[in-house]
Image (cartoon, rainbow, N blue to C red):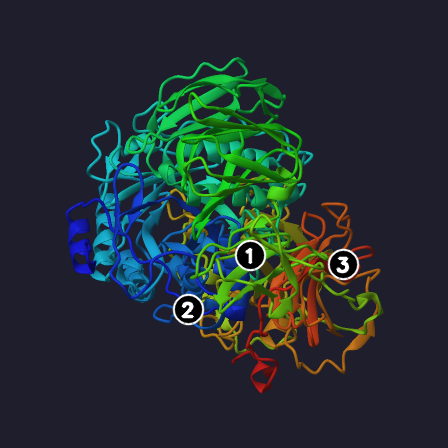
Amino acid sequence: MIRRSACAAAIALACAGCLASAPRPAPGAGGATPQRGPVAGEDHTVSFDRYSLLIDGKRTYILSGEFHYWRLPSPDLWRDVLQKMKANGYNAVSIYFVWGYHSPKRGVYDFTGVRDVEKLLDIAQEVGLYVIARQGPYVNGEADAGGYPGWLTTIAGRARSDAPDYLAASDEWLTRIDSILARHQLTNGTGPIILYQIENELSAHGESQKRYMQHLYDKARADGITVPIFHNDKGRNGLWVPRSSNVPGTVAGPVDLYAFDNYPGGPCRGDATPGKPNSAPDWGIWGPGGARGGASASPETPGFTAEFGGGWFDHWGSAGTYACTSVRQGPGYERVFYGTNIINGLTIQNFYMAFGGTSWGWIPAPVVYTSYDYGAGLDEARQIRPKLTALKEMGLFLQGVAPITKLTKGEPVAPSSPAIKVYDDVNPDVGTHVYFVVHDPSSATTDDTVSFRITTSDGSYLVPQSGTLRINGQDAKMLVADYAMEGQHLVYSTSEILTHWTDGNEDFAVLHGRDHEDGETVLRYASRPRVEVLSGDVASTFDPATGDLRLDYTHGGLARLRITGGGHRPLTLLLADGTTTATFWRPDSDAGAVVVRGPELVRTARVSGGTVELTGDTKEPAPLEVWAPSGVRRVSWNGADVPVRRTDSGSLVATSPLPGPDAVTLPDLSRAVWRVAEGSPEAAPSFDDSRWQAANHTSTNSTTKPEAGRPVLTMDDYGFHYGDVWYRGRFAGAADSVRLRFGGGGAGLLQAWLDGTYLGQHVLPSGGAQSPPTTGTAAFAVPAALRGAGPHVLAVMVRNDGHNEDGGANDAYKEGRGLISVALTDSTGAALPTAIAWKIQGSLGGEDLPDTARGQMNNGGLYGERHGWYLPGFADGSWRTASVPATTATPGTTWYRTTFDLDVPEADDASLGITIGDPATPRSAANYRALIFVNGWNMGQYVANVGPQHTFIVPNGVLNPRGANTLAIAVTSDGGAGNGLEAVKLVNLGTVRGGVPVKTNDAPGWDARWGGEKP
């Protein structure tokens, strides 16, 4: 056994790797206990060879999903998401730790509240998930600046290089985050972290990047990181492979494992209809090989896809494709594409995203709007989509069928139909065969039937022996032969394995197939066994010459058999159709296997005395059936005793359904009292800006410089990094027009006033583009009445919809935001030499936050934000009342406030949202945008005439589901009829009975500190 110190030393010598202990057994919410895995605090090892990771010497298939805590600002709900992932087949979670989310100012770091990653890692450990840590410095992730802090935009050195100032800044972050990650490593026996990523999708690989990567590796090891280190290669280019790889065309680097990403499913397009993805690629043992062949770039390490498409992000101005993407990359896609990866020997798979969440506040990069649903298996409202259920089937299979972790190519298989392809893999240690049956090409949408011959140590068989095997359009099957299934021997089955277990001296197994499809299972015995069909229609024949017991059936509901004698332990065999399979769960307990059928979700299981204590959710009244360890006679559900009876298939069945959720009644916001105030006083010439900063810098490290001789205006240079920024410029002299170059990100906006007269607005076009324009130039004619010598006041507001990412390692994130340069022009359009004295104001306090709980990305520089108008407790009694929807609007920003009470039943977990306008249309005709603040938290930006988002999820924790709530909406409009706030309503996006305990976030309301421009 390699202990921690030996493991670290071995990695330094390019060892076979190191892994760590499984999550620590510690009680979770509702008496939750960890599910399977080594005990923390004991010695554990993590190693790897060319086939798989080994944890304590045991081969372990890693099925991981991406989750971003920073896109769910409710720490208690992290448990909800992670429990749902665990229950639905994942055994690991991949997490970006975002530098910019934790650091508002150089040298200042916050790991409390919604940034408490210690709590996150503890929850993952308690739930029973391993963690793949991806802490940057650069992450990408469609996050502002790719995860960099706003203050980093002002450094001189190039990011993602060995520039000294960049390395110094990166080390500052890594020192802090590594101190946390190192304490939660599996190799320490103190946490769930098994892998550590030092960079993400770094395609540049010059000498500067090579030195940079070595620096990151050495820094991680010096900080106490002992788990294997990897880099995620964008698109399989053979970049940053371990030095053990001698594959021509690769670039070696300081990593222990090679990982790559790709998104072969692609997004929905145009009319947002799903269509079918292209054929699944072979990126492992069945592939073309070489540097660009995926796992073949590093033949001595396990096949590892650090990001495999589980959906796709959506863009400003699109048709709204998340629902479509969830179907396109739905159950069929998962079975075909993920299954192809499995049969290619990729034993570490991470799907991006498992839960997309919400890019609340100013988290988004310019390419995306607020929702980051991603079409994931767990939608933005935390509801389970059908694709997550299909993944559960795959996850249970991978956790239960151990030979899958070491596969080599078998002999070619000739299927009866040219429309079908059959892969044959074999485990060289035990001889088990795995057959993957899929269309050829796999993108085919037709239904086909096939038979094929297999040859194993059990003999040669035509599969199936009777009839044919059906493969539906965009579907595939993973079949197993010559397999020791607990105490049984499975010759083959045309049903897929869901799970199997042993309790005492009895074996249990669940096999499944699509609804109404034929199935055939062959088991081997020394002599004729006794077959008792407990329910369903199953025919059996026994061949005494071979010892084969053949079972023939049609998948319909749940058939149950009990097979005894024949030289094996008794076997209870459950044969389920697809509909029934979806209702199976395997939470397990410290006392042994626990398998449950019936509810919407089973979160945890614990055996105490003779009772199995279950927690979970129901969407409606649901049956409950439990297979629990011997000695269990009683069942409780969410703390309540459940009357049960014993069945002849070894289970306990509830005598009446579990209750569903109670009805949830939501207040009607159209009847609410709305109070309104104008929010752009900065536009008035008489506005007092005496305490604003002078914008008079003469140099900048931004990639967008001002014109020669003009001052630096970019907002980052003055400590303002997020949201809206205001400028006021004074000049004397006549001008016919004004030209303003600005940076606003995707769908960014500029509004301008001269001497209090509204000149107009300019919106950067988006049109659903994946890379929309992020800078632009606004030109406004000066009204004739204002063309005199002055003096004049030019007031400008710019909305910054995010800093560019830095995917090309070209400092794209340093592109200027806010004003870049301004020119007054004459009647010919020529620039005048007139000097403008500028002042600037952004978020209250700039980098010195008055509200550390919500953080730097919660607020920009609107007047109402600087004065706390969005906060609970603000005294708005002097504001006028108004109706919503509003029939008209004035140019600039108008604030709306109301309060509402919620009374969600105590037993319910209701996921609520706020809808503005008509969700049936991606874009409204109204020319305005709105920032939505709930209890002071900025839950997103609605842009009516750009779209497509109308509904904004507000997670419990931000929302108080059983009490008072404050809603503030900052509406920025071009003015005029039809450009006012549309209808606003609360919506229920899914309710279950169950959930996890959630307390309301601890964040300040309004007080005297919000009375002026300075905190």
Q: Are marks 1 and 3 in contact (CB under 8 Å)?
A: no
* In the displayed structure image, the side of residue 917 where residue 116 appears, left or right: left
Residue indicated by mark 1: 359
Q: Quadrant of the N terminus?
A: bottom left
Give residue 16's mark: none
Give residue 26's mark: 2
The kind of residue tagged 2 is Ala
Disc 2 secondary structure class: loop
Image location of residue 50, percent across then percent down: 27, 36
- Graded by Cα atoms within 10 Å as few (under 14), some (14 to 19) or many (20 or more), the crowding at tag 3 reads some
Image location of residue 739, percent across then percent down: 58, 51
Residue indicated by mark 3: 975
Could you say which quadrant of the image residue 888 lies in?
bottom right
Q: Residue at x 55, y 56 (%)?
A: 359
* In the displayed structure image, the side of residue 873 where residue 882 appears, left or right: right
Distance Cα–Cα, label 1 vs label 3: 28 Å
